[in-house]
Image: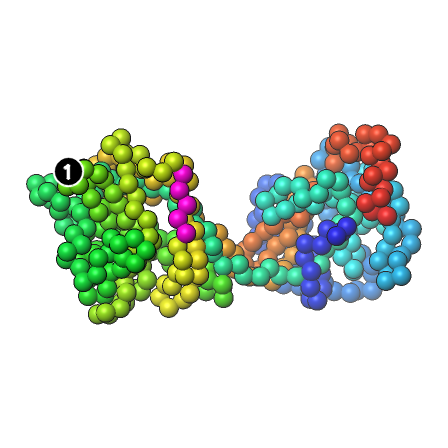
């Protein structure tokens, strides 16, 4: 949309302020966000910021030449400036000591450029909305012989999940469940698979508890296979669902490798302790699940991470010594917004007349 507007909203802008209460790392110089004070109009057009620029780096700035009918400013061709007396104007523009407007390379949430050329930097103050979990990245090694509470090396099949002991067959893919009546039997014949914090669409945080159960073995069925379950209800009573099969049989070859080269299992309409999570895809990836001998006889969790983000109000902005601008939120999230210092070696930085004119058209 022509301007970097990563933080929109009616609350007004918060100012840069020195603060000793929060450490943003060695890369930050001088100003950290003031998390309590609103942007105050003290009668001036600017609020100064301290900054220690990298040697030989410059800022890209432009002058305002007019305004559109709707009041949006129009800008002239950008030029380089070493003026590091930066301030944030009342209407969200980043300006230097001469009143010139700074340009920056817009960044996505991962810190990667989201534009091909710099744009005039403008900030506003929206918070971020809650985004529920839709994806779980998970990697683990399963022991060749699971040392469950019921397992006995001398008893064939004692390490397996004996479906005949359950009121409902828990190994059925897509509908396998464990009822509250059978909860103890299930726990005695399965292994802990870790717990992951997931976020419901309404912002509630829920622990997603996983367990692995070995269904068949080379000795009993000529093939090793496992089932993965998630806990539906912590305090399930008789007749209520306590655990549910995610709906995929994990088969392993004789060398302990999963049959599938890469695996993503969609789990539909997940409900945990009365909280609806919706559909979540469990991403195992290439080699994400293995079955190698492990003396402990337990599941070794290699990775367990869910996406999603809690909502949070905008609390301030900060900038690193390298000229990267960040937004901060009440939920602890820090997001990169733009790079505003340049070395002069960038491909678009005055490389030729066409590049300069292309840049001019973006900001005029």
Residue 296 sits above or below residue 210 on the image: above
Give the residue at x 67% y 39%: 322
Instruction: Pick whichever, 6 or 42, lies toward us.
Output: 6
Q: Please indicate whether residue 275 sits to the left or right of residue 312 in the image.
A: left
Where residue 132 sits in the image (x, y, percent)? Answer: 49, 59
Position of 268 compared to 15: left or right?
A: left
Q: Residues within 10 Å of mark 1 (few under 14, many from 20)?
A: few
**Mark 1 = which residue?**
219
Which colour scheme appears in the figure?
A: rainbow
Is 258 above or below relative to 329? above
Q: Is residue 69 above or below residue 110?
A: below
Residue 246 vs residue 332, the one in the foreground = 246
Q: Secondary structure at mark 1?
A: helix
Q: Where's residue 69, x and y in %? A: 89, 61
Is 229 inside the magenta-drawn segment? no
Residue at 78 percent of width and 48 percent of height? 120
108 shown above or below 316: above
* Residue at 50%, 55% in the rendered image: 308
- First to last magenta residue range: 262-266
> How many numbered callouts?
1
Return the x and y of residue 347 as percentages of the image width and height.
75, 31
């Amino acid at each position: 949309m022509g301007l970097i507007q990563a933080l929109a909203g009616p609350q007004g802008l918060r100012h840069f302020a020195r603060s000793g209460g929060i450490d943003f790392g060695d890369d930050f110089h001088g100003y950290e966000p003031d998390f309590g004070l609103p942007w105050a109009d003290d009668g001036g057009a600017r609020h100064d910021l301290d900054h220690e620029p990298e040697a030989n780096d410059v800022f890209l700035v432009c002058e305002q030449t007019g305004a559109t009918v709707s009041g949006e400013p129009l800008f002239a061709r950008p030029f380089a400036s070493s003026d590091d007396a930066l301030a944030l104007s009342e209407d969200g523009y980043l300006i230097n000591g001469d009143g010139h407007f700074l340009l920056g390379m817009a960044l996505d949430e991962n810190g990667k450029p989201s534009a091909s050329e710099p744009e005039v930097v403008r900030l506003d103050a929206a918070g971020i909305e809650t985004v529920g979990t839709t994806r779980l990245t998970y990697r683990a090694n399963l022991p060749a012989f699971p040392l469950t509470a019921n397992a006995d090396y001398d008893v064939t099949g004692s390490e397996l999940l004996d479906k005949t002991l359950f009121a409902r067959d828990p190994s059925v893919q897509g509908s396998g469940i464990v009822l509250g009546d059978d909860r103890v039997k299930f726990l005695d014949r399965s292994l802990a698979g870790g717990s992951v914090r997931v976020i419901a669409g309404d912002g509630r945080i829920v622990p997603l508890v996983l367990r692995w159960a070995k269904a068949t073995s080379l000795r009993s069925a000529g093939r090793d296979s496992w089932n993965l379950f998630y806990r539906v209800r912590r305090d399930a009573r008789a007749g209520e669902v306590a655990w549910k099969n995610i709906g995929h049989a994990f088969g392993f070859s004789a060398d302990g490798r999963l049959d599938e080269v890469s695996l993503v299992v969609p789990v539909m309409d997940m409900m945990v302790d009365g909280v609806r999570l919706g559909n979540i895809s469990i991403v195992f990836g290439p080699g994400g699940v293995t079955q190698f001998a492990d003396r402990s006889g337990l599941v070794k969790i290699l990775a367990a991470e869910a996406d999603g983000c809690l909502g949070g109000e905008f609390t301030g902005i900060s900038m690193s010594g390298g000229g990267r601008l960040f937004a901060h939120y009440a939920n602890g999230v820090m997001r990169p917004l733009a790079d505003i210092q340049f070395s002069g070696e960038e491909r678009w930085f005055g490389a030729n007349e066409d590049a300069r004119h292309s840049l001019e058209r973006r900001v005029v």
